[in-house]
Amino acid sequence: MISANLVIFIAVGYVVLLFALAYFSERWAAGNRGHFLRSPLVYTLAISVYCTSWTFYGAVGSAARSGLEFFAIYLGPTLVFVGWWFGLRKLVRIGRNQRITSVADLISSRFGKSNRLAVLVTLIAVIGSTPYIALQLKAITTSLSVISSDTIVASIGDRTDDNRLALGVAAGMALFTILFGTRNVDAKEQHHGVVAAIAFEAIVKLVALMSVGIFVVFGIGGGFSEIFARAESAGVTLHENGGFSTRWVTILVLSAAAIICLPRQFQTTVVENSDENHLRTASWLFPLYLLGMSVFTLPIAIVGLNLLPPGTDPDMFVLTLPLAHGQELLALFAFIGGFSSATSMIIIASIALSIMVSNHIVMPIALRTPWMADSDDGQGVTNLLLNSRRISICAVLALGFLYFWLTNGSGALARIGLISFSGVAQFLPPIIAALYWRDATAKGAGVGLFVGFSVWAYTLFLPSFFETGGVIADWVTHGPYGIGFLRPEALFGLEGVDPLVHSVFWSLLANSGLLVLVSLSTNQSALERIQSTLFVDAFRRLPGTETRFMRSSAAANDLFFVAQRVLGAEKATGIFDDYVKREVGSRTRFEPTPEFIAHLEKELAGSIGAASAHVMLSQVVSGDNISLQEVMQIADETQQVIEYSQQLEQKSEELKLTAEKLQDANEKLRELDQEKDEFLSQVSHEVRTPMTSIRSFSEILLDPEGVTSEQRQRFLSTIHTESLRLTLLLDEILDLSALERGEKTWANEPVDVTKVLQRAALVCDPLAKSSGIEVRFDPASDAPLVEGNGDRLCQVFINLISNAVKYNDSEEPYVELSMKQVGKRLQIEFQDNGPGIAPMDRKRVFSKFSRGHRGVSNAQTGSGLGLSISSQIVSHMNGKLDLVRGSGEGACFRVTLPLAQSAKAAE
Amino acid sequence: MAGRKRSEGFAFFLPVLGAMLIMPPIVMLFDVDVSLFGIPLIVGYLFFVWLFLVLASYILTQGLPRASAEVRNAEPKPDRKQ
């Protein structure tokens, strides 16, 4: 056994160490050496204030009593941190942008800076946290009496805890918290000294618990498998004991909610956050810390149940196991670990609660009290704030002590913890609505919170006083005034459910249900609407751009006076000077803009909370808020502008497309124009040649004397031939232009190609004979009919055959006509063995007035329009005229024509 | 950007997956009288899921963008536009 005085002496020494640590950390943070204090590691360790003495001692007790349930307490927060990107990140971002000082401030600020909501949340937080603080005091006194008593066996109630000791601890913690938690009214409510001390305590408790764990598992237990083999005989059933029922799910939900809603967690995670990126580390390091804290929980419980005499309090196994094996030093270290976890919770919880109480309860009252509001002293409000915080800390700890004193000697630690969790879990619906639901209203949040909290108080908090007997015991057993239907633990006849599950179900159902119902049936005020946009769209806008809806004006002097009263003269001057320097340039022309007023309000909110800051400023600011209609109108106008600009964008896109099309068309027109010019000059040229010869022959004939009758005959025939050529040319031009305009002077009808070919060959026969060319044609009798016009097709064929005849200069000239059916089309080919067509000419043979350059052996050249006209005709028959690579070396033209409908049908 | 989108998808999926793994009915599958290397299956399973979440979160965080310096450090300033 260790003497109680020695233990107390060591505990006091430990607290002195904390004081020193906090003191030097504050000094480092004030200088520039505090980088380490603002590291993600310290941030994560501070968050682990989640692990209180309830974890340190109670988890083992819980494992001994109900197996795996303690896992759920840690897995819930693990899930929340693993999902940080969608939840905590937004919360932290909003906390930073809006200078949120507490969970009450968050909810109040989101719902139109409502002070009534802030008061409600503060009261719930205080009522929910007081038992928890009492629990820590109890853990400290119990552990002290265990470590200093000579027997480790003591049943619950046997051991009366030392009230004086609890009072001493509470007073010491109050002193520490006042010293380091209320040194100044910081604009961001960050306490580097306190955080450093908490981080240190987090390491102490982890190392202490793990040391005990290692000693138990490897020192006396004989390894993990050995211990788990003995689980059965110890009475711990780990499987199939119904552990994963609704209670498991409920505790998961509760612990996930608690890691956000507990005032101390909100303080360390959101308010004390100095860099959003620290969450990146915390997202995996904090779950890892929790894992480390619970690795040895089960083995300690099993070994404790196995080795220690029955009747030993399972909650104290962490201490009694080392003690029973004579490891007094280890037990002392474990005691310090438990002491760490208890003190860290007390410190942070009382800071968080005192900020809430002073900002949301004391300040609003002081602001409404004339003698406080009128005090001319510049430091008045600052001092009031600090003093009210100091008093709040004392009051919170006093309440905790009172609770401890009144309930001394009853109840297990774990039960109080879960009652507290489900109390603060009532904040979860309004917080989620604050972050993600634009239309949630203050009335909805207020009604939901109030009713949810009342249900919690009735179904869980009240029955926790069952052991005190009297009216409460009667109510719990028989219902109020004997109405069984309203029994607190079987509300509306819902029986056979675990009391915790029962209470959480009814309270959260009422809370969120009313939040939704009332929100949907009430309207938001203008301020609520503005704040809801700022919260829900926290990631969409940069800080500082949110003030455009505010239209307010105030005298600079009044503003300065208010700022000075809250922040102190030095800080207020700093803010004003900074603004003047940046925006205005000279002090004389300084006019407070709405932006500046909003900025100032935020600075004030960082000290006294959003609601109080709003009240203070609205006393000196005139016309501060614009009406809802105006906000809506502005929003509508903005919407219209956005739509209009989108339309403009679309229009300009269309215009761009049109311009491109126009450019294309222009290009095409230019080409056509050039083509037309070329055409005209060629036509003139073509017409001119015969005209010249006609004219000159006519001139000769006009002089009758020098011409013999034989000559006259010849000249006249030449004139005749030339005029025929001219007429032919003009006919062809007319024909071509008609075809190009799309005129079609014939109707397509089924045509027998063989007959047409024979006709064409017959027409060309004289020409072929005179040139000595053989026309090879093997008429097929079964050739299908095609769609077209016989006469026009004949014209095309004649043109092709005569071209082949005219340009052929080989030794044994021939033209070979062939046809074959390809799918639903008929191909007719004209292959000659002439010189062929030069590659450079292949493209332009079908254009007007172009003639093959090679192989022009005689003067019998055509107009150069033949192929052009043929091509047009064939295309009017839905066919195609191409120059293809034939079998021989000469040119090969192919006419492709669609089969006639009847022919197709015949197949 | 595609990488970021994917990381965000996983960031949403991971806690959902974690919740499914530790809630009934999946957790019931492991709630049987079987021991792995002397450790009850259910205990091993819960610690395994826990460790998996820690590791996955660590890896995932590397793929998610850091908050920009402007958002982190700058004290919110009044709107400069007039």
Image: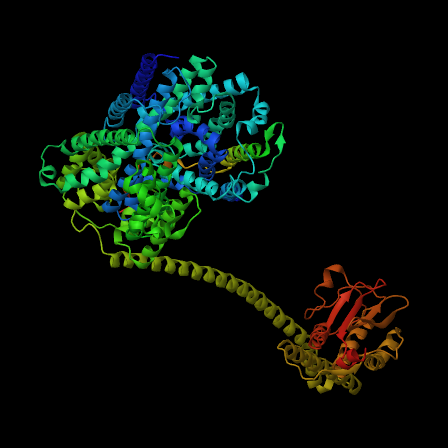
Residue situated in front as seen by the camera: A637 or B82: A637
What is the x, y in percent for residue B43?
55, 32
- Is residue A823 shown left or right of residue A261? right
Colour scheme in the image? rainbow
What is the x, y in percent for residue A60?
46, 28
Q: In the rendered view, tell whether residue A321 sits above or below residue A733.
A: above
Res. A196 visible in picture: no
What is the x, y in percent for residue B21?
54, 41
Res. A513 visible in picture: yes
Q: In the rendered view, tell whether residue A824 sits above or below residue A616.
A: below
Residue situated in front as seen by the camera: A828 or A33: A33
Q: In the rendered view, tell whether residue A723 sits above or below residue A138.
A: below
Image quarter of the C terminus of chain A: bottom right
Q: Quadrant of residue A134?
A: top left
Name the residue located 57 percent from the left edge and 19 percent from the top edge.
A222
Image quarter of the N terminus of chain A: top left
Q: How many marks?
A: 0
Name the residue located 86 percent from the left edge and 63 percent from the top edge.
A888
Residue situated in front as seen by the camera: A837 or A501: A501
Q: In the rendered view, tell whether residue A29 sits above or below residue B45.
A: above
Q: Quadrant of residue A591?
A: top left
- Is residue B34 shown left or right of residue A405? right
Residue situated in front as seen by the camera: A890 or B74: B74
- Is residue A568 shown left or right of residue A739? left
What is the x, y in percent for residue A445?
31, 49
